[in-house]
Amino acid sequence: MKRFVDTIRYAWIDHKLQREVKKKFYQDEPFAKLDKALLTAYIFKNPYIISKNYLKKHGQADVHTYGETPLITYEKIAKECDLNARDTFLELGSGRGRGVLFLSHFYHCFAVGIERIPQFVKLSRHIAKKHEVSNAQFLCGDMLSVNIPDSSVIYLYGTCLEDAEISRLISRFKSLSNRPKIVTISYPLTDYDEGVFQIEKTFTVSFPWGETEAYLQTIKENI
C-alpha cells in the first residue's frame, strides 16, 4: 500500500516538475522538440516498469531502484561544475538519457551516458540520431565493469548502490589519470575513502522524493 501511495505522490511531483521544465526550457524550440520526442517514446513504455522487469529477469533482489534526476537538478549540477563546451560529461546510469541530451544541448559539452538496460540505450540512441544530436553518446553496459571514457565531469546518482558497489567504483575512479570532477548525491566519496578524495563544494539539489546534498569532489593530487 505504501509503495502505491508513493507512486501516486511521485507521479504528481513529476507532473509539477514537467510543468516547470516546459516553462523554463521549452522556449528553446529545438530542445522542446527533442525532449517531447523522448517523452513521447515512453508514453506506453513506463521506465519504472522497464527497469523493474529487467532487474527481475536478471535476479536482482531489489527491483525498485530506478530513479531519475530532474532537469532543473542537471542544470544546478552543470552550473556548480562550470560545465562548458570543452568538457566531457559522463553519467553513470543514464536511464532514458534525458539528462545527457539536456546537457549536450544547453551546455554544448560532449555528454556520455552509460546504462545497463538495453531498451533505454536503444531509444536514447534513436532519439539522438533522429534529432541529429552529434555531441551525445550512449553506451550499453554495467558501470561497474564497462570501460570509463575520459571525462572531465562524472555524475553518479547511485543512491541505491550497495557499499561494495561504491567501493568498486572508487577503485575505478582512483585509476583515472585525468582527475575528473565527480558529483555524487546524498553522500560524499570521502565517506568511503577520505585519503583519495577531497570535497570541493557541497550544494542542495531537488528530486521528486525531496531535497538532498550533492557533493562535488576531486581526486587528490598525490594519489
Image (cartoon, grey):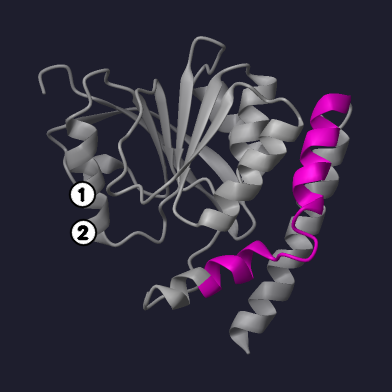
The residue closer to the viewer here, 83 or 9, is: 83
Across and down, in percent, residue 219 comes to 23, 26
| Whether label 2 touches label 1, CB < 8 Å | yes
Q: Which residue is mark 1?
A: 168
Residue 98 showing in the rendered view: no
Mark linked to residue 153: none
Mark 2 is on which residue type? Ala
Q: Hey, which residue is sitting farthest top in the picture? A: 86
Seen at 53% across and 72% down, the residue is 52
- Is residue 47 shown above or below 78? below
The span from disc 2 to disc 1 (Cα, nearest Å) is 6 Å
Q: Which residue is mark 2?
A: 164
Mark 1 is on which residue type? Arg
Q: Magenta segment, which residues?
A: 28-53
Does residue 58 show up magenta in the picture? Answer: no
Across and down, in percent, residue 74 comes to 60, 35
